[in-house]
Amino acid sequence: MKAKNKKITIYQVANRAGVAISTVSRVLNNSPNVSKKTKDKVNEVIAELNFRPQVSARKLASREPQMLAIAVPSFTTPYYNEVLKGVKDEIAEMDLDIVIYNTGSKNPKEGIENFFNRGTADTIITISIDIDDDIHKQLDSSGVPIVLIGSSHPNYDYFELNNLKGGFMAGEHLIKQGYKRLGLVEPAIKTKASHNRKIGFLDAMKEFKMPVEEKFILSGDSTKHAGFTEEAGFEAIYKYDKLGDFPDAIFCSNDTQAIGAYHALNKLGIRVPDDIGLMGYDNIKFTKYLDLTTIDQKMYSVGVMATKRLAEIIRHPSDEKVQTTIDPVLVVRNSTNNPKKS
């Protein structure tokens, strides 16, 4: 009786045929570097055991990458979903399996350490992971092709996002719309991306000689997803309400915050844009249906570009790095249509 397929491995085939597992893999890949006698013997055992090779067995001899690990602070938010869609659609061309590892938003460094303690994959893409010296050492020691999305480091290929410019564009737009008092909703847990958006926003106010009212720069209390959530945006609006004072327009650090802020304003009877301007950041799908002004980071395209670059590194290893900064695009909608604009 033939053994069941699920119990047969390349190791059993090699043992029965009296050859190394690399030889079995070469036979599976039709390598010319195997004698006809050995090839016939291995094929005979394969037929006898009814062996059905997995992709890993076929790739063993060539040492081709089999698994792409994606390290990401969260995979449940719209921003990361869009980036992951781009990776997923492009990875279909590369014959790689994917494992997504959630590093967490509160302490991604610890999450990365846990990831490496479990064993690395053959290739790695990181999304929105700030690369400090400790994380660099772990990535570098892995010795596998690596591409960074949403962060940068001189030792790696990367597709950085120009958050400084995006923040400036947000501030410039609101000022040019005639808003005089501007507010900013930050995340509760500061990240490099949120910091740069804030700096860019404040740079715009400085350039246009607009006064900065510190009381209007605040965050919600929620730390879930570092504070880039609907709850955080909702909470921030009620903090403005508690102040008893609102800015003319509010820039939220991302779209999900802006969605929560929109809901809170509505509950308070404050109309967008008649009473207050509101904008977000990311241009996720929902913003189109809320008519929300936002900043487009080209998230899907960045996922595709990073994955294409990874494929190039695998096919043609080189010391040369592709290090690209992606400029954002302002998407103007009705939420910042200031009725008082002169």
Image (spheres, helix red, strand yellow):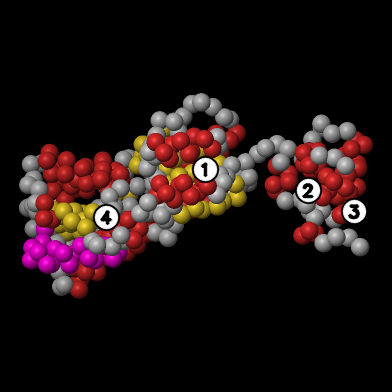
* Amino acid at circle 1: Ile
**Kind of residue indicated by mark 3:** Glu
The quadrant the N terminus occupies is bottom right
Q: Element type at marker 2? A: helix
Q: Secondary structure at mark 4?
A: loop
- Distance between the Cα atoms at labels 3 and 1? 38 Å
Residues 125 and 280: in front is 125
Q: Residues within 10 Å of mark 1 (few under 14, many from 20)?
A: many
- State which region is magenta: 230-248
Q: Tag 3 or tag 4, which sits nearer the N-term?
A: 3
- Direction from residue 183 to residue 62 in the image, left or right: right
Q: CA distance from mark 1 to mark 4?
A: 27 Å
- Residue sitting at x 45%, y 33%: 156
Residue 121 appears left or right of 219: right
In the displayed structure image, the side of residue 44 where residue 172 appears, left or right: left
Q: Which residue is mark 2?
A: 10
Residue for badge 1: 124
Tell me how far mark 1 sits from mark 2, CA to CA: 27 Å
- Secondary element type, mark 1: strand
Q: Which residue is mark 4?
A: 187
Magenta stretch: residue 276 in it? no
Residue drawn at point x = 22 percent, y = 46 percent: 198
Mark 4–mark 2 Cα distance, whole angstroms, equals: 51 Å
